[in-house]
Amino acid sequence: MKCALSTAIALALIGASGSAFAITDSETNASIPFSFSSPGARSLGMAGAFLGLADDATAAYANPAGLTQLAQTEISLEVRRTDYSTPYIDGGAATANPYDLSGLNISSADTSKNNVSFLSVVIPHDRWAFSFYRQELARFSTDFTTLNGADLTVGNDEFVLFPFRSTADLKIVDYGFATGFKVNDKISLGAGIAYYDFSLQSLTARLDDEVTPPVFASVQNQNGDDKGFGFNLGARFRLHDTLSLGLSYRRAPSFRYSARSVLLAGNGVPLDPPITLADTDRVHFDIPDIWGVGLSWRPSDALVINFDVDRVEYSQLTENVDSLFQADSAAQRLQLDDGTEIHLGAEYTFASMKHPFSVRGGAWRDPRHSVQFNGVPTTVDEAALATLFAGGRGSDTHYSFGGGWAFTKFQLDFAADLSEGLDTYSMSGVYRF
């Protein structure tokens, strides 16, 4: 027979899949809204392929060794608009034994953010160059509601996945200092240190509509403000007059925040007092480390072609998952695999114009970075988590284009990066003096 879940753990688990921010087994952690491409509209227009070129102020973050190519003091500013599509479970049915999630309905919530994403100043001096910058590494918010309770069948038992509302807001800003040193005409090295400011708030509330009038079944929230330090390293090698190689490594900090899960009702009966399933201030959010290598080829004075490969250690986010539902063994089967980004972009400059104009384009492959359940669930806890994390986004291909004008002391660039789940529009300016 069909029934509401009778245990406190299962009651708190039922819900839907949302967007990701930190690592507990709350469904608000399903799809990570990170973008690790190099900042700046110029780089964005070339699909983020920039490690081997690294010849403007954004090199402070992408590859600080490239700062040695700058001959003038310059100030750079970038503004971005980012449109997100966040998938979530919106009714339907799932079964375990046999394991089948194909009957679930997936909807999406669209949100947008406008922000000053990058600001920097670069000061060159002899064989050295110094840079100070501010970057918004992540800026995301969402708010969505489903009134469709999904069905979950485990063996001979049938359960109701309650309707819910989920809200979340994430912001990560880093303030950095980077320097580049020109060893000789062929080799440059760079390093930087950054101070990170992390803020997270998320809330999921579930409504038990199996009873009249409906009551709130459970609430899960995650909150935190934390600080930390990270660093980046870079190298650039001039292999030939037309070919250069760039290497980079970025190490970001791990932040700590608090999470709480409270059961408000059991089988439609309000609990007095409510049952606290989890209450901890030791949950960790570990920004993935990134290794990168890039080649920049200039077959002519007008054309440059860039190719980057970045290895993103996403698995750091799901090491030792904290359970909000007293389902520790099931939560450890939630995983996020490391991913490899492949970027290819090009720039062509009409240098004969009074104010040279450049056109840019490219494509890159974004690997899956949505948390998912590993294997086939066999228990109620495992089946609930597998369902909660069934709506994550898979790998995606991005296409980018852009352009820019260069003046005597000023440069203006614009770009767009488009994909199925994430669109980014950028405009940046550089002033040299």
Image (spheres, rainbow, N blue to C red):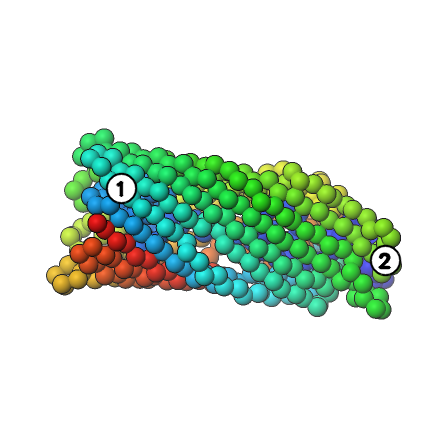
121 relative to 303 in the view: left or right: right
- Residue 293 in view, yes or no: no
- Residue at numbered disc 1: 123
Classify residue 236 by image quadrant: top left
Where in the figure is residue 252, as x and y percent of width and height?
Answer: 47, 39
Query: Could you classify mark 2 by the number of other residues whose Cα lies within 10 Å: few (under 14), some (14-19), or many (20 or more)?
Result: some
Picture residue at 29% right of the left edge, 59% below the top: 413
Picture residue at 26% right of the left edge, 53% below the top: 431
- Circle on res. 270: 2
Q: Secondary structure at mark 1?
A: strand
- Residue 260 in view, yes or no: yes
Residue placed most toward the observer, 316 or 330: 316
Residue placed most toward the observer, 31 or 42: 42
Q: Nearer the viewer, mark 2 or mark 1?
A: 1
Residue placed most toward the observer, 89 or 415: 415
Where in the figure is residue 204, as x and y percent of width and height?
Answer: 68, 56
Q: Amino acid at mark 2?
A: Pro
In primary-sequence order, the first of circles 2 and 1 is 1
286 relative to 44 in the view: left or right: right
Disc 2 versus disc 1: distance between alpha carbons? Answer: 64 Å
Image marks 2 and 1: residues in contact by CB distance under 8 Å: no
Picture residue at 19% right of the left edge, 31% below the top: 184
